[in-house]
Amino acid sequence: MPVAVAWFYTDHVLLRVGYSTEESYSAGLFNRWYILSLFPMMWYICIQNYLQGRGDAMPALYTNVGLLFVNGGLNFILIFGIPGTSFSGFGFIGPAYLLISIFFVSLAVLQGQSRSLAIMASFLPGAWGVSVPLAFVFVLVLHLGLEGLWGALVAGYATITITAAAFVLRSDWDRLSVAAIERSKSSAPNSGSSASDNLRST
């Protein structure tokens, strides 16, 4: 909740510290729409962690692979609108949602595959190799202000998204599915035996 409140007042904070009205409005508009993703994401993370704690990665894997295609269609609508109707899309917000949705779906698939190294290999180059250097150049050298910082973050997250999506698309699904099934089988007998042992002890 504190994060949602902070994001809701993004434009007010930016105006207070001296950013332009246009930049503050754009950042505030994006964050207000992004608030809608917080609560479903929280529920999803709870369910995913519960299933992973049971050693069952397959539901998250199948769900995220399916939603990858759903997000592609929805983000086309968000950016370009629906042909033949009055809805022309959100323009500025749509591309940002496109990157974020592909990024989170790819991240969730890699988590479901238990591929932590692939996640790290996606984050390090994008966050530290692209976003930070570009932010320094755009803001402190070229003096582009908030637009420069925004551009650096977009470039960094685009790099992370492309790298993570490449890992997902190049996945050996047969091998990973077998590995996930084996993890599920190895955890199930342990839980069953411990339950039966508890019943015997009582």
Image: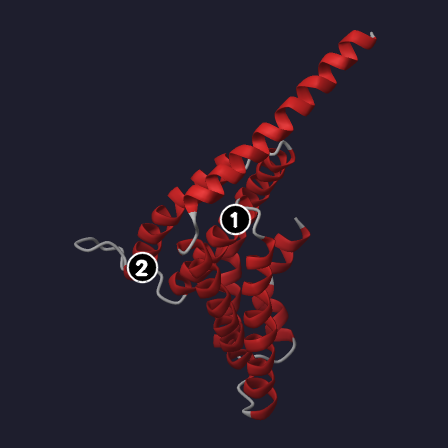
Q: Quadrant of residue 189?
A: top right
Could you say where residue 78 lies in the image, as x and y percent from the top left?
Answer: 34, 56
Q: Nearer the viewer, residue 169 or 160?
A: 169
Q: Nearer the viewer, residue 25 or 187?
A: 187
Taking the spot 52% from the left edge, 72% from the top edge, the residue there is 156
Q: Is residue 132 left or right of residue 168?
A: right
Taking the spot 53% from the left edge, 72% from the top edge, the residue there is 153
Outermost residue, left direction?
84
Q: Which residue is mark 1?
A: 108
- Label 2 packing within 10 angstroms: few (<14), some (14-19), many (20+): some
- Which disc, if any, is residue 14? none
Q: Secondary structure at mark 1?
A: helix
Q: Nearer the viewer, mark 1 or mark 2?
A: 1
Q: Which residue is mark 2?
A: 89
Taking the spot 48% from the left edge, 60% from the top edge, the residue there is 164
Disc nearer the start of the sequence (1/2):
2
Q: Nearer the viewer, residue 89 or 157?
A: 157
Could you say where residue 175 lies in the image, as x and y percent from the top left?
Answer: 46, 43
- Label 1 packing within 10 angstroms: few (<14), some (14-19), many (20+): many
- Does 12 sit above or below residue 108? below
- Does 26 sit above or below residue 107? below
Taking the spot 59% from the left edge, 82% from the top edge, the residue there is 133
